[in-house]
Image: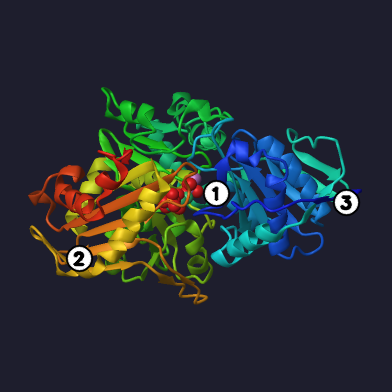
C-alpha cells in the first residue's frame, strides 16, 4: 500500500468540547480540516501495530465522506482492522457496545449529537477509548495540543471508494475493513439486560407506545427492538428513516424539538407511553399519557426500581449524576445505602467511576441516562428500562412518578437555555456572577438566603485529576439551587444554561407546574446575572 504524507498547517479551532469536536459542516469540509483532527487523535494515542478500531456515525450529512477519509488514514497509521457499521451507521451507545465486545483499541464516532445536520448544519467527531467511553480530558487535551502543532498527516494513496453497504470483510492495503450489522450486537445486549418476555406481554395486552426516532440514528435500532423483537405495532416507531439532514428537524428529544411526539402524547386518544432519542441515540425523553418525566426524576426512578429489571436485580454499586442534575437520585442512593457521586457535565467523567466498579447507573439532566453495560449514555436502554418497570409494576407512567414523589419528596426542576447569544455577553454574565460571590453571601431575596456560591470543581476519585470551572452554583439555605453554565456543544455564538431546583418534601402541598413553583428562583437568577439586560433576550430559547 502506498502511503502519502501530506503537509498541512494547524487550524486554531480544534478544541474538543463537552463531547468531541463540533463545527458547521462548512468548516469540517475545508481541505485538511478533518484530516488534521484525525491525525491529531492518532498521534495522541500511540496506536500499537495492527490495532482494531470501531468507526461509525449518526448518518448525518458528510458521514460517508468522512468515513472514507478516516478508513484511509487508519490504514496509513498502522491499524490492522476497522469495524464499520453498515452504511457508516453506528449509534453512540452501539459504538460503545462494539468497542467493548470486540475489545478494540478504541473507536471514532461521527456525530454532532442533538445539533441539526445537513449542508448548513453541524458535523462532529469524537474519540472513545478501549473501555468504550469518551476519551478523558487528559486525552482530549493531548489531541488539542497535537492539533496546534501538526505539520503532516498520513493517508493511504488509494482512489477507490470502500464499499460500506455489504456486511463482510475487504482489504484496504494491509488493513481489513469489516462492515458489521450496526444493530445486532446492541440488540443482543439489550435482550440480556431486560425482561423482553414481560415487555412483549405488556405490548400484546393493549399497552400502546410511540417512539420518535426524529429521522436520526435510532430508527433501525427501534424497529428491530420494539417491532421485530418485542412485537409492538409497526406504527409505534415514527420518523424511523435516518436522513442526512434529519428531515430538516432538530434531533433533540425535548418538549420543544420533539413537538410531533409531544402532540401525540398530549392529544386525544394518547398512547400509554412515548419516548424519543437524539441524533446519535444516546439521549432519551420519557413521556406518559399527558405527562412529562423530567430526566433527573427519570434517573432517580430507574435507580429506585432497578431491582425489578433482570440485569440489575443484584443491586447497584452506586449512582453518579452530573452537577446540574437534580438531587432526586441522591435521595434514592441514601435509601439504598449506596454512594452517589457528583461529576462535571459530560459523560467522560463517568467512565472512571464505572471502570472502578463504584457506580452502576449514571445520569444527566440533559436527557442522558445509562449504566455500566456500556460507557456512553444510552437512549433506547432508558426506554427499555421504563418499559420493563411498567411491565412489572402494571402502573401508568404518571402513577409511578407520583408514587416516587410521595415516597422521596420532589426535586422540582427546570432548565432554561439561552441559545446563540453573543460570546462576550455570555462571558460577561459569568464574570459578573463570579465578581458577586461575596455580595451574594450577604444578600436576601424574599424568603431566599444564599448559603454558598462557588464555581464547581471536581477531583476524580479514581485518578485524582482535577477539573475546574464547571459551572457557577448558588445554593440557598432551604436547599434550593441555581446553576449557571456555558454550553460546550454549541457551534453558533454561546449558549448559557440556567438550572433551577427546589425541594418539596410534601407533594400534596404544592403546585405541579415546575415553572410556577420555581418562579421566584427564576426571577432571582435573572436579577443577579443581569442576563436580560446583557443579552437583550426577554425569554429562554428552550425551557425544559
Ligand atoms: C450538553 C449537555 C450535557 C451532555 C452533552 C453531550 O452539553 O448539557 O449534559 O453531556 O450535551 O450530549 P453542553 O456543554 O452543551 O451543556 V450529546 O447527546 O450532545 O453527546
Ligand atoms: Co447525543
Percent across and percent down for residue 69 are: 75, 43
Residue 70 higher or lower than 326, as above or below: above
Q: Nearer the viewer, residue 476 or 263?
A: 476
Residues tagged 3 and 1 counted as in contact (Cβ below 8 A): no
Give me the residue at 64% from left, 41% from top. 28
Residue 237 higher or lower than 416, as above or below: above
Alpha carbon distance from label 2 to label 1: 42 Å
Left or right of 165, for residue 319: left
Quadrant of the frame with the C terminus = top left
Q: Which of pointers 3 and 1 lies earlier in the amino acid sequence?
A: 1
What residue sits right under mark 2 in the picture? 440
Q: Residue 457's image quarter?
A: bottom left
Q: Residue 433's image quarter?
A: bottom left
What residue sits right under mark 3 in the picture? 174
Instruction: Name, please, the residue furthest toward the bottom.
Output: 464
Given this view, does label 3 or label 2 mark the residue nearer the observer?
2
Give me the residue at 32% from left, 26% from top. 263
Which element is circle 1 on?
Answer: helix
Q: Which of pointers 2 and 1 lies earlier in the amino acid sequence?
A: 1
Which element is circle 2 on?
Answer: helix
Residue 93 tag number = 1
Which element is circle 3 on?
Answer: loop
Residue 190 higher or lower than 206, as above or below: below
Given this view, does label 3 or label 1 mark the residue nearer the observer?
3
Residue 49 tag number = none
Percent across and percent down for residue 232 are: 45, 31
Residues tagged 3 and 2 counted as in contact (Cβ below 8 A): no
Percent across and percent down for residue 106 are: 67, 58
Q: Nearer the viewer, residue 472 or 196?
A: 472
Amino acid at each position: 500500500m502506498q502511503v502519502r504524507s501530506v503537509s498541512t498547517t494547524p487550524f486554531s479551532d480544534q478544541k474538543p468540547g463537552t463531547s468531541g469536536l463540533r463545527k458547521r459542516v462548512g468548516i469540517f469540509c475545508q481541505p485538511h480540516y478533518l484530516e488534521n483532527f484525525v491525525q491529531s487523535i492518532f498521534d495522541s494515542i500511540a496506536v500499537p501495530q495492527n490495532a482494531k478500531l470501531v468507526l461509525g456515525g449518526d448518518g448525518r450529512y458528510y458521514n460517508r465522506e468522512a468515513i472514507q477519509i478516516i478508513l484511509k488514514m487508519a490504514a496509513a497509521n498502522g491499524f490492522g482492522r476497522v469495524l464499520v457499521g453498515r452504511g457508516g451507521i453506528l449509534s453512540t451507545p452501539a459504538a460503545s457496545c462494539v468497542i467493548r465486545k470486540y475489545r478494540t483499541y478504541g473507536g471514532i464516532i461521527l456525530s454532532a449529537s442533538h445539533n441539526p445536520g445537513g449542508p448548513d448544519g453541524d458535523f462532529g467527531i469524537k474519540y472513545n477509548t478501549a473501555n468504550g467511553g469518551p476519551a478523558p480530558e487528559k486525552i482530549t487535551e493531548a489531541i488539542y495540543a497535537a492539533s496546534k502543532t501538526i505539520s503532516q498527516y498520513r493517508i493511504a494513496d488509494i482512489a477507490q471508494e470502500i464499499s460500506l453497504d455489504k456486511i463482510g470483510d475487504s482489504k484496504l492495503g494491509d488493513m481489513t475493513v469489516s462492515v458489521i450489522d450496526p444493530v445486532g450486537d446492541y440488540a443482543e445486549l439489550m435482550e440480556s439486560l431486560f425482561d423482553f418476555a414481560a415487555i412483549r406481554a405488556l405490548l400484546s395486552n393493549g399497552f400502546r407506545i410511540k417512539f420518535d426516532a426524529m429521522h436520526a440514528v435510532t430508527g433501525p435500532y427501534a424497529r428491530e427492538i420494539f417491532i421485530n423483537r418485542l412485537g409492538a405495532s409497526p406504527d409505534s416507531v415514527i420518523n424511523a428513516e435516518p436522513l442526512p439532514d434529519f428531515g430538516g428537524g432538530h434531533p433533540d428529544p425535548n418538549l420543544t424539538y420533539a413537538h410531533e411526539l409531544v402532540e401525540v402524547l398530549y392529544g386525544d386518544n394518547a398512547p400509554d407511553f412515548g419516548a424519543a432519542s437524539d441524533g446519535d441515540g444516546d439521549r432519551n425523553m420519557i413521556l406518559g399519557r399527558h405527562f412529562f418525566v423530567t430526566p433527573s426524576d427519570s434517573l432517580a426512578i430507574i435507580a429506585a426500581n432497578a431491582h425489578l429489571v433482570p440485569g440489575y436485580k443484584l443491586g447497584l454499586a452506586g449512582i453518579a449524576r452530573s452537577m446540574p442534575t437534580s438531587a432526586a437520585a441522591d435521595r434514592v442512593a441514601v435509601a439504598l445505602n449506596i454512594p452517589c457521586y457528583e461529576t462535571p457535565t459530560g459523560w467522560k467523567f463517568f467512565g472512571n467511576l464505572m471502570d472502578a466498579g463504584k457506580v452502576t447507573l449514571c445520569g444527566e439532566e440533559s436527557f442522558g441516562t445509562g449504566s455500566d453495560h456500556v460507557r456512553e449514555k444510552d437512549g433506547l436502554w432508558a426506554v427499555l428500562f421504563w418499559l420493563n418497570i411498567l411491565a412489572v409494576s402494571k402502573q401508568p407512567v404518571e402513577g409511578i412518578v407520583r408514587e416516587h414523589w410521595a415516597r422521596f419528596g420532589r426535586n422540582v426542576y427546570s432548565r432554561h437555555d439561552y441559545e446563540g447569544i453573543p460570546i462576550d455577553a455570555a462571558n460577561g454574565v459569568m464574570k459578573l456572577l463570579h465578581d458577586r460571590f461575596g455580595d451574594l453571601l450577604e444578600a436576601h431575596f424574599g424568603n431566599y438566603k444564599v448559603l454558598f456560591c462557588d464555581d464547581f470543581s471536581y477531583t476524580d476519585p479514581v485518578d485524582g485529576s482535577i477539573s475546574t470551572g464547571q459551572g457557577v452554583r448558588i445554593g440557598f439555605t432551604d436547599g434550593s439551587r441555581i446553576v449557571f453554565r456555558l454550553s460546550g456543544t454549541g457551534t453558533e455564538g454561546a449558549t448559557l444554561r440556567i438550572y433551577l431546583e427546589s425541594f418539596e418534601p410534601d407533594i400534596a402541598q404544592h403546585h405541579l407546574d415546575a415553572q410556577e413553583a420555581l418562579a421566584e428562583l427564576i426571577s432571582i437568577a435573572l436579577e443577579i446575572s443581569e442576563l436580560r439586560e446583557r443579552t437583550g433576550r426577554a425569554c429562554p430559547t428552550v425551557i425544559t
